[in-house]
């Protein structure tokens, strides 16, 4: 646990905000309206244990790079008015890294990357070829 804030108001009763970390997962628990200090502590512990017990962090950045590598190996371009159809692709930098997912849904998470394959010359080195920004699809709720 690395952060704690207790509080009390007549409207909200006893409150507790706790932040803690296990491995690569940070949790912030907020309990409002507890009748006693014991209740707010117990409820906060339950929330934290539930989160750590039922969620895990998955490396979306790794999954995105893996999907991109597969895409690069399989994609065929059609460049009209071009000298050839050969393009060298790079994955742009992104902030996608670790993401919390229910442990029961980890195998259901997939990344779908769509890319334009019909292009017209000139294709410049900084052109973005994605149809839409990277789409992340889940079959079930996280």
Image (spheres, grey):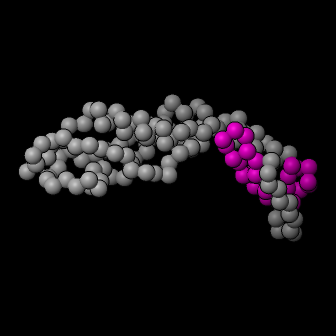
Give the quarter of the figure containing the C terminus. top right
- What residue lies at 49% left-to-right and 42% top-to-bottom? 61
Image location of residue 130, percent across then percent down: 30, 50
Image location of residue 93, percent across then percent down: 43, 51
> Quick one: 71 or 45, which is closer to the camera?
71
> Is residue 18 highlighted in magenta?
yes
> Quick one: 49 or 93, which is closer to the camera?
93
Residue 66 vs 78, above or below: the answer is above
> Quick one: 53 or 78, which is closer to the camera?
78
Image location of residue 64, percent across then percent down: 43, 40
Image location of residue 137, percent across then percent down: 43, 42
The quarter of the displayed image where residue 50 is located: top right
Q: How many marks?
A: 0
Q: Is residue 29 left or right of residue 42?
A: left
- What residue lies at 56% left-to-right and 43% top-to-bottom? 98
> Quick one: 90 or 63, which is closer to the camera?
90
Give the farthest residue toward the bottom: 10
Q: Is residue 14 left or right of residue 133?
A: right
> Is residue 138 highlighted in magenta?
no
- What residue lies at 91% left-to-right and 54% top-to-bottom? 37
Residue 131 visible to the viewer: no
Q: Is residue 74 left or right of residue 1?
A: left
- What residue lies at 27% left-to-right and 50% top-to-bottom? 129
The magenta-colored residue range is 14-41
Residue 35 vs 99, above or below: the answer is below
Residue 77 visible to the viewer: yes
Residue 98 vs 37, above or below: the answer is above
Tell me which secondary structure the magenta stretch mostly adopts. Answer: strand
The quarter of the displayed image where residue 49 is located: top right
The quarter of the displayed image where residue 59 is located: top right
């Amino acid at each position: 646990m690395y952060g704690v804030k207790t509080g009390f108001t007549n409207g909200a009763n006893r409150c507790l905000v706790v932040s803690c970390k296990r491995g690569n997962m940070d949790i912030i628990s907020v309990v409002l309206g507890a009748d006693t200090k014991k209740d707010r502590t117990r409820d906060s512990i339950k929330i934290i244990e539930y989160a750590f017990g039922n969620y895990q962090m998955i490396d979306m950045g790794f999954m995105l790079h893996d999907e991109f590598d597969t895409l690069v190996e399989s994609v065929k371009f059609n460049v009209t008015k071009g000298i050839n159809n050969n393009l060298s692709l790079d994955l742009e930098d992104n902030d996608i890294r670790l993401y919390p997912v229910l442990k029961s849904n980890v195998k259901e998470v997939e990344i779908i990357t769509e890319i334009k394959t019909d292009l017209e010359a000139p294709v410049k080195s900084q052109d973005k070829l994605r149809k839409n920004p990277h789409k992340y699809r889940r079959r079930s709720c996280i």
